[in-house]
Structures are given as structure tokens and as C-alpha cells.
Amino acid sequence: MQQQAYKIAIVDDHILLASSLEQLIISFGNCRVLHISKNGKNFQHNLINHVEKPDIVLLDINMPVMDGFETAQWIKETHPYIKILVLSMEDDEASIIKMIHKGAKGYLLKDTQPEMLKLAIDEIMSNGFYHSDLVANTLVQAFNKDTNASGLGLKNTELEFVKLAATERTYKEIASIMNLSPKTIDGYRQDVFKRYHLKNRVGLVLFAIKNGLVDI
């Protein structure tokens, strides 16, 4: 029996790019595009007016009216069965962390190769998540780490630091909240990164999520 095609929606305010993306996705052979939206509000309208719902939404971040962050949050709250694959020019940790918190199952840059996009779609449908080389090492480490919240060995202050670091607060803001010096916070960061073999803040966030220290 032939596999049913994955249903894709595209949310991107660059119409030419979105149209090209549609043709690329169709060429994969196992996908079809339900609709293209120019921002989150337009996507809400399209979702309401189409009987079929997408399996995956290819979501840009920077858009007018309703951006990718707002759209991802809305999808998470109202249609959690729809999987989000971010396709953006933003490669900073803050954007990645924020999108992970809002339920993104994958994060690709717009200059990714077509075969990587197909792989991401296939992996999300098969395994529930996919990330590019941008975050792959930390994702694999976080999701396969054989530790649990009861045996992490974190001191109370370290635990508080990890929870705060999993938010969008800067390290300077965390130091202020904990009534500690930025130097002390940097010491916590270095110790936790070294102890749990984390490479960056994205890895720290995923470590906290994996071990039940924060909710997403």
C-alpha cells in the first residue's frame, strides 16, 4: 500500500520563496502542500477554512502582523498535534531556545540543502523531532543522556541557575535575580557545562527539559 503523503503548510511572508518552497516540497514525492500563509494570522484563517489539517507547519520567524514565535505558541496551545519545523535565517541561540520552548520539533536555516529539508520532514514524521547541525550535537546528547532529575547531583543554587538559564533571561539578569555576581554565575555555567558535557546554552535548555527541571 502506498504511503499517504505528508500534509504540509507553509507560513512565510516572502511569497516568492514560499512558492519555490512549495514546488520543492512537492518534488519530494511524499508530501503535498495544503496552503501557504504570509503570517500567523493568515495561517489561522487558512487553518479554519480548510477541512484537512497539516501534519507539519514550515514556519518562518520574522513576519509582520503575527510572527513565528506568536504563531508557534498559538499552535502549541490550540493544535498541539501539528508539528512545527522552523525554517528561518535566525541562527542565534536565543531564537532556537525560544522556539524549542514553544514546541518546535525541528529548526533549519533557510540556506539548508533540499535533501536536508526532506530528511527533516521524514524524521519529524517518523521520530517526532529533527534538528540540523546547528543544534544536532546538543539534541542527541540531551535526548539520549541516561540521567534523571533525582540523580543529577545539582546543588540548590545550581538547580536554580539551570532553571533560570532555561528561560530567555540573560546571564546578567540571572545574577541579579540570584543576588550573585556575574562572575559567580559564570562559574556555575562553566561547572554545569563541564559536568554534564554540554556545549552551549541550547544544550543546557534541552538538558533541563529532558530531566524534568522545566516544562515546555
Image (cartoon, rainbow, N blue to C red):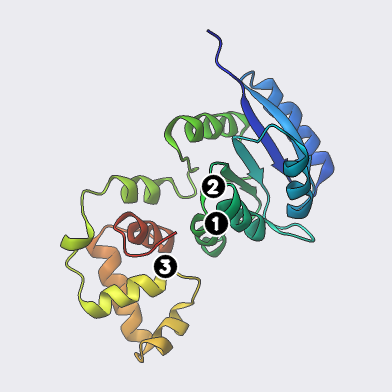
Residue 195, x across and y down, in percent: 22, 63
State the image quarter where residue 171 is shown: bottom left
Residue type at mark 1 is: Met
Horizontal side of residue 17 vs 25, given as left or right: right
**Nearer the observer, 109 or 37:** 37
Residue pointed to by mark 3: 166
- Along the polypeptide, which appears first: circle 3 or circle 1? 1
Q: Residue at 63% across / 59% down in the picture?
A: 69
Residue pointed to by mark 2: 80
Q: Is residue 209 above or below residue 34?
A: below
Q: Residue furthest right?
A: 16
Q: Let me know if residue 110 appears in the view.
A: no
Residue 113, x across and y down, in percent: 61, 34
State the image quarter where residue 84 is shown: top right
Q: Secondary structure at mark 2?
A: loop
Horizontal side of residue 118 vs 42, given as left or right: left
Residue pointed to by mark 1: 99
Residue 161, x across and y down, in percent: 33, 76
